[in-house]
Image: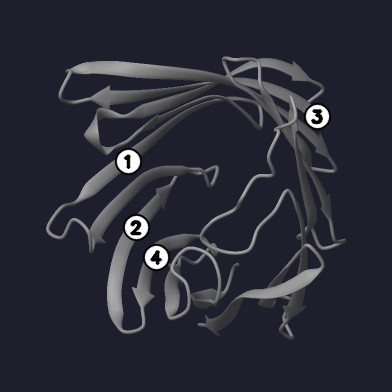
């Protein structure tokens, strides 16, 4: 969001619940460089972000967390590229956890297959537990239209997306193979395997109010205010 100095978001459903809001500080290119979250007047957490010249995050520094005051956590991100496509990404988190995305197939830059492996350090056992999944991403007009995730049990989760003309997500439909016997219950706020979104915009075309539609019910999820330089 070039030209925007700060964005304040107020959230009504989901993680945090009512009274939860955030403030984001942006750089001259419109990238978030610092985000603080609050519940009413109480600061819950703050983190900063740094980017490379491709606008990919290379560093996240959590400077405050109400659950771990006095602790600073740093996450690093490393990349290699094949033209404009990320061919390799390594995420190194606090506590010796990490994750790797490795591009294993590219069909015309429109179907990308990644091998994803996460590594979790178990401190009391002093060993590392790994988990692998396969991600297949389908793109059309530079928008993600379908995401397939297959785990090591060969279970598949498929998410399909449609968009408004301005690129904002209009609908997300999720299905699973094999199908589950019981319907998934979403916690922390409204949600479902079939979600639609509506937006109200300010005079500059930026989202002012975000709504989610689930099971024919409309929920106001968030409102946003922008401050320009």
Mark found first going from the N terminus, 4 or 1: 4
Could you tell me how far apart the alpha carbons at marks 2 and 3 are, in whole angstroms? Answer: 32 Å
**Residue at the location (18% across, 56% down)?**
68
Mark found first going from the N terminus, 1 or 3: 1
Q: Residues at badges 2 and 1 in contact (C-beta under 8 Å)?
A: no
The residue singled out by tag 4 in the image is 35
Residue 190 in the figure: left or right of residue 12: right
Q: Which mark is residue 75?
A: 1
Could you tell me how far apart the alpha carbons at marks 4 and 1 are, in whole angstroms? Answer: 15 Å
Mark found first going from the N terminus, 2 or 1: 2
The residue singled out by tag 3 in the image is 110
* Residue 188 rendering spot, x and y as whole percentages: 51, 60
Quarter of the view holding residue 90: top left
Q: Which mark is residue 48?
A: 2
Residue 228, compared with residue 87, is above or below; it is below
Could you tell me how far apart the alpha carbons at marks 2 and 1 are, in whole angstroms? Answer: 10 Å
């Amino acid at each position: 969001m070039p030209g925007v100095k700060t964005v304040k978001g107020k959230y009504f459903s989901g993680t945090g619940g009512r009274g939860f809001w955030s403030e984001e500080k942006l750089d001259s290119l419109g990238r978030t460089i610092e985000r603080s979250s609050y519940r009413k007047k109480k600061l819950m957490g703050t983190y900063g972000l740094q980017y490379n010249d491709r606008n990919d995050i290379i560093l996240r520094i959590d400077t405050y967390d109400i659950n771990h005051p006095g602790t600073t956590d740093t996450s690093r991100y490393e990349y290699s590229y094949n033209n404009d496509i990320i061919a390799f990404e390594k995420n190194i988190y606090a506590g010796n956890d990490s994750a790797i995305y490795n591009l294993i197939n590219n069909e015309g830059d429109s179907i990308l297959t990644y091998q994803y492996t996460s590594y979790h350090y178990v401190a009391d056992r002093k060993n590392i537990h790994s988990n692998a999944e396969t991600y297949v991403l389908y793109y059309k007009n530079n928008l993600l239209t379908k995401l397939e995730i297959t785990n090591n049990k060969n279970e598949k989760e498929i998410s399909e997306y449609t968009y408004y003309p301005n690129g904002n997500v209009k609908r997300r439909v999720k299905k699973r193979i094999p199908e589950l016997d019981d319907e998934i219950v979403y916690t922390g706020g409204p949600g479902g395997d079939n979600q639609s979104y509506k937006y109200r915009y300010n005079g500059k075309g930026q989202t002012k109010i975000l709504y989610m539609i689930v099971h024919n019910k409309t929920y106001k999820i968030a409102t946003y205010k922008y401050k320009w330089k």
